[in-house]
Image: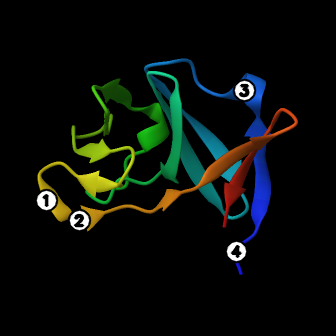
Amino acid sequence: MSAFVKLTTESELPAPGQAKEFPCGDKVICVANVNGTISAMDNVCLHRGGPLGQGVIEGNKLVCPWHGWQWDVNSGEAVHNPVVRIAVYPLKIENGDVMIEQ
């Protein structure tokens, strides 16, 4: 059974239209804020390993800062090929803490 663990605090979340990186165990998670909706996904672009949390938001897509690959923040699908996807993680907020399901 999956468990939720603390990722960060609500006050540390990225502003609307931005993404941010957060350490989580042995990996880094990219948290994106698209018009107030927060989503979490793996931080590593499948193209060349770019840091997605340093990318930009365009519409509901996160654009990798290295080579411009675009990712749907809700499904984790690559825009150019929906078969290619990165992991997306459920989040919840409890008492000001942002919890991620592992």
Which residue was labeled with disc 4?
2
Disc on the earlier residue, 2 or 3: 3
Disc on the earlier residue, 1 or 4: 4
* C-alpha span from label 1 to label 4: 29 Å
Q: Disc number at residue 84?
A: 2
Disc on the earlier residue, 1 or 3: 3
Residue at image position (11%, 51%) is 80
Which residue was labeled with disc 1?
81
80 to 56, vertically: above or below: below
The x and y percentages for residue 23 are: 68, 49
* C-alpha span from label 1 to label 3: 32 Å
Q: Residue furthest bottom?
A: 1
Q: Looking at the image, how many numbered discs can be counted on the residues?
A: 4
Q: Is residue 100 left or right of residue 78?
A: right
Residue at image position (21%, 37%) is 68
Disc on the earlier residue, 4 or 3: 4
User: Can you tell which of label 4 and label 3 is closer to the viewer?
Assistant: 4
Amino acid type for the residue under numbered disc 1: Asn
Q: Residues within 10 Å of mark 3 (few under 14, many from 20)?
A: few
Q: Is residue 74 left or right of residue 59?
A: right
Q: Secondary structure at mark 2?
A: strand
The x and y percentages for residue 38 are: 54, 35
Amino acid type for the residue under numbered disc 3: Glu
